[in-house]
Amino acid sequence: MHVDLGNALETTPGVTEETLTRLDSRVADAHERITAGMADDEFGYAALNLPETTDPDAIRAATDRFDRPEAVLTVGIGGSALGAATLADALESDVDAYFLDNVDPDAVASLLDDLPLDETVVNVVSKSGTTAETLANFLVVREAMEAAGVDWTERTLVTTGEEGNLRALADAHDLPALDVPDGVPGRFSALSTVGLAVPALQGHDIEAVLAGGRDGMESLSASLFETPAYAYGAATYALAERGALTNAVMPYAESLETFAEWFAQLWAESLGKDGLGQTPARALGATDQHSQLQLYRAGPPDKLVSLIRPTERAETGIPETDLDGLAYLGGSSLGDLLDAEFEATEASLAAADVPNLRVEIDRVGERELGELLYEMEAACVLYGELASVSTFTQPAVEWGKKAARGLLGGGDFPEADAVADKRELRIDGS
Amino acid sequence: MHVDLGNALETTPGVTEETLTRLDSRVADAHERITAGMADDEFGYAALNLPETTDPDAIRAATDRFDRPEAVLTVGIGGSALGAATLADALESDVDAYFLDNVDPDAVASLLDDLPLDETVVNVVSKSGTTAETLANFLVVREAMEAAGVDWTERTLVTTGEEGNLRALADAHDLPALDVPDGVPGRFSALSTVGLAVPALQGHDIEAVLAGGRDGMESLSASLFETPAYAYGAATYALAERGALTNAVMPYAESLETFAEWFAQLWAESLGKDGLGQTPARALGATDQHSQLQLYRAGPPDKLVSLIRPTERAETGIPETDLDGLAYLGGSSLGDLLDAEFEATEASLAAADVPNLRVEIDRVGERELGELLYEMEAACVLYGELASVSTFTQPAVEWGKKAARGLLGGGDFPEADAVADKRELRIDGS
């Protein structure tokens, strides 16, 4: 991963090289804290050891018994789905990957109608084994398999913690089961069994993904000027402190669209605490130039834009044309056009004084993705250290879980009573 | 469309009923301005007349000659794609809809490989006929059709302005061609030929979409307390003025995920001006409860959350289970679970003092979608009036277009020179 901070120097908000130099001594302290946490396999920090602690052979042992399925259906939500989805959507495979990461009845029904259930592997993922959405979806999927005459016990892979419903289910039916590693919050689990079972089933090189993660590990040093991950984490932190409360993450590659979603979870859930944090806005280049760029350039100065691209792309030439005013496109390629748009957007933001960061990877491949995911996690951990927040917890999501459970009759929770007390000011029209 | 402002009363930021009452006299003035603009078919305001001025028979005449294709491939970007994509992704059809709204060489090549080109209608959309991304993609698609031995002139539909390259192309090859209406910016064109050709090709009831738009027209009145569109527009405006610079748009229906993208363009490009505007953050319920909710509840108080749902859903029961602690789910349905999550999230935000707006439609159907799109456009126009911005222009996107064109050798532009002057501070790691 390569990071270029040039277009965040003296913008509004912005930093200077002197700011970054001053910040660098805090980066050194944070790096010391991070390496100590890694050495002790502390909760959360353990995630940064995954490239070394994840055993690809265990993943292969569990996935190899499914002989090249037509499709893999992951039943999981949030961190149980997004890492695998990022890899699956970035890399081409003839094994299709689907994700049931919501409980929308229309979408679930329509997906189950379309899937060849007898050629599909169901990959159910929940660390606790009690996530309501995941378990409800799994019950529906299992029933659909039974209705279609498919033996679900032959086609189900479980990824879960040491105990709980899913572990018991796997034991009872002798299902292949992978362990969710200890000490790793879901949003940091892409480089574990949670993120790698799907790419393994799709025939991707998960050893290369982990090797990329190790490249990321090795790149960590005590200075942001030597470490792309820390350069990104420190710059986004400093810009947020100076008012860039929104981070628009804009990959110029459709294959990285899900990466932007993964990033959004990592950033929001890790750093959105104590009234601090930075809102990740998911965008896509060049498409969103025709949608969000007006706002980024001319709206409130509360943003930074992270522009991400692979430097190597497929070659798709644009045919010659005599269409009026378009001759200049002929003989060029779609990749040239996309890169020109990338650089033009970057310059256009700079000309409007809007900070923007360039992040590049060499290509969209297994190793580069492993490195990208690892280094963005390290960037996030560094940001959390600098902001003194509790990076690895998510206390604010518990309230709603209790309320939902109470509403469904799953116990007595005062949160559910608050739902009934909702204040109304309803406008229904004529 | 039904709007409930109750959970934005006295939150942080928030409004009071008195605030809204004071604001209502400005809403009355703005409504007068809007109806005058509509009466004169003024630029932009003309969009609010589309439910009456769009001729569904002209659309049918152009699309009927393609007899139930397997797929429709729209080549267009921004407003030329998002309205049609919103309808196509919300409504089920056995005619698949695809959108080439980016110039990513990998994605274009992979899509063209998969499409049955001899059973696909290509729908190329550009008002000016010069949009670089659209024309480049069209040239690539046309070449692919020729290479596959498909007569592209038999399978291409053009939607464009009165003059320009695409009009000339349609004339030269006698292609069916639809007119982009005058006075309608792309992001406001969902209820015109631009948005309706694709659903017509998919077999949807476009007359019902337009009827829904007329429901929206008829709902407009001089008071926000009587008009859901104005209630939404006035509340979002007042909350933005009070610090809610981000509007997280979170539909609780997968079928409305593209609607959130359409909304993001409408909101960002119309209102992001003069240092004002509100950043649309696209989210999806319940999935993003496991991703963004931590930030919304505990991050900076610069947000409002718009929760959107259909009140009618498909019935997908959750099978009974004896899994530990999950018995409460059995006999319930996925829709019940999703609605419980909706109400729990709403209450959880309110308990954390975060403003949130409830928007409901009766179901995800043609008529309801027509009304939703219309009323959100009217909400946006009202917001623009209240903020005194130039709602219907997008001056800040021109700079980058010139720079990109200059980089590709399409002329001499000083903007392209600025790209070469980019400041660098590059961190490459070890």
Image (tube, coloured by chain):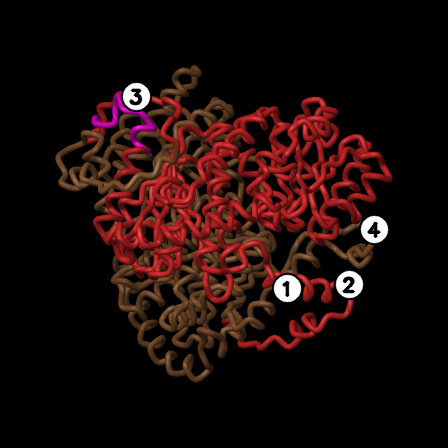
Chain colours: A red, B brown
What number is the disc on residue A319? 3
Classify 10 Å Cα crowding around label 4: few (below 14), some (14-19), many (20 and above): some
Residue that badge 1 annotates: A400
Is residue B76 visible to the viewer in this orientation of the structure?
Answer: no
How packed mark 3 is, by other alpha carbons closer than 10 Å (few <14, some 14-19, many 20 or more), is some
Q: In the rendered image, which quarter is residue B240 located in?
A: bottom left
**To which residue does mark 2 refer?**
A410
Q: Name the residue under label 4.
A: B323
**Residue lying furthest bottom:** B18
Query: Quick check: B224 left or right of A50?
Result: left
Magenta segment, which residues?
A327-338
Vertical placement of residue B134 versus B5, above or below: above
- Return the chain for callout 1: A
Quarter of the image for the C terminus of chain B: give it: top left
Taking the spot 84% from the left edge, 39% from the top edge, the residue there is A171
What amino acid type should be assigned to the residue bearing mark 1?
Gly
For numbered disc 4, what is the local secondary structure?
loop
Q: Do the residues labelled 1 and 4 touch (CB within 8 Å)?
A: no
